[in-house]
Amino acid sequence: MKPSPPAAVLAGAVLSLAAVTGCSAANKHAEPPRATPYAAKHATDPPAGNAVGVAPGGCPTAASLPLPKEFPENLPVPDGAVVTSVEHRTGGRLVVATVVRGGFDSTLAFLHKRLPKAGYIPKEGEVEEDNAESNFSSTSVRGRWTLRKMSDCEGGVYLTYLTSAVS
């Protein structure tokens, strides 16, 4: 029996979110990609005097990539977040990976406080010792954020946003 088109779309969305959030047991602590075709194509040289790459401790030292114009304008991003990659996916989905140096608890508190103030309703989230994730939606955007401690960058966390326009 063939699945109905809505069921197939839902199954595809669930599989895509699982892939983005790294929910498989075998790949739970894999590092996020450091570069994408977008990053390579749109990266600019950092200002003179800034080191390029990763410091010996694993923290990014390159200049942040710009947020793409498709990123929701009112979606809060912590101050000082370094955008490490941007990926445009089918169906108008956008994945933006960042590194935040404010620590896990502070970044989690930021997300819990600032997203609702900006009009994003959290749902279906969970928090564990070293990682957290939640879906969110507004009248025009639906998405998911994931947060994971970095083992090689003191106070650093990976914060990834997956967004798409509500149709």
Image (cartoon, rainbow, N blue to C red):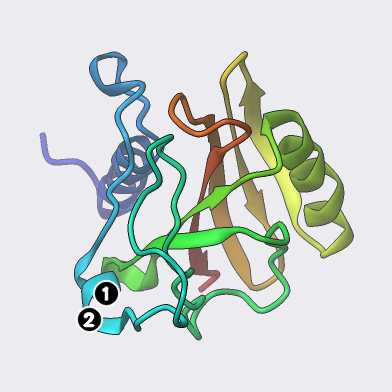
The structure residue drawn at horizontal position 83% and vertical position 54%, both measured from the top left corner, is 114
Q: Which mark is residue 38?
A: 1
Badge 1 crowding class, 10 Å Cα cut-off, few under 14, some 14 to 19, many 20 or more, is some
3 sits to left or right of 72: left
Tag 2 near tag 1, CB within 8 Å: yes
Using residue 132 as the reference point, say whether residue 57 is left or right of it: left
> Where, by quadrant of the figure, is residue 149 drawn?
top right
Occupied quadrant, residue 3: top left
State the CA–CA distance, disc 2 to disc 1: 5 Å
Say which element carries label 1.
Answer: helix
In this rendered view, identify the residue nearer to me: 11 or 54.
54
Q: Position of residue 34 (x, y in %)?
A: 29, 53
Q: Residue 134 carries which label?
A: none
**Is 16 left or right of 152, judged from the image as shown?**
left
Horizontal and vertical percent for residue 54?
36, 49
Name the outermost residue toward the front.
49
Along the line of sight, the residue nearer the viewer: 51 or 102: 51
Q: Residue 41 carries which label?
A: 2
Q: In which quadrant of the rendered view does residue 130 lie? A: top right
Residue found 35% across the figure and 64% down from its top: 52
**Observer-nearest residue: 69 or 104?**
104
Q: Mark 2 packing: few (<14 Cα in 10 Å), some, or many (20+)?
A: few
Q: Which residue is drawn at 86% across and 47% down?
A: 113
Q: Which quarter of the rendered picture does the N terminus lie within?
A: top left
In this rendering, does residue 131 appear at all? Answer: yes
Give the amino acid at mark 1: Tyr
Amino acid type at circle 2 is: Lys
Identify whether 158 is placed above or below 23. Answer: below
Write the residue at 66% across / 60% down: 80
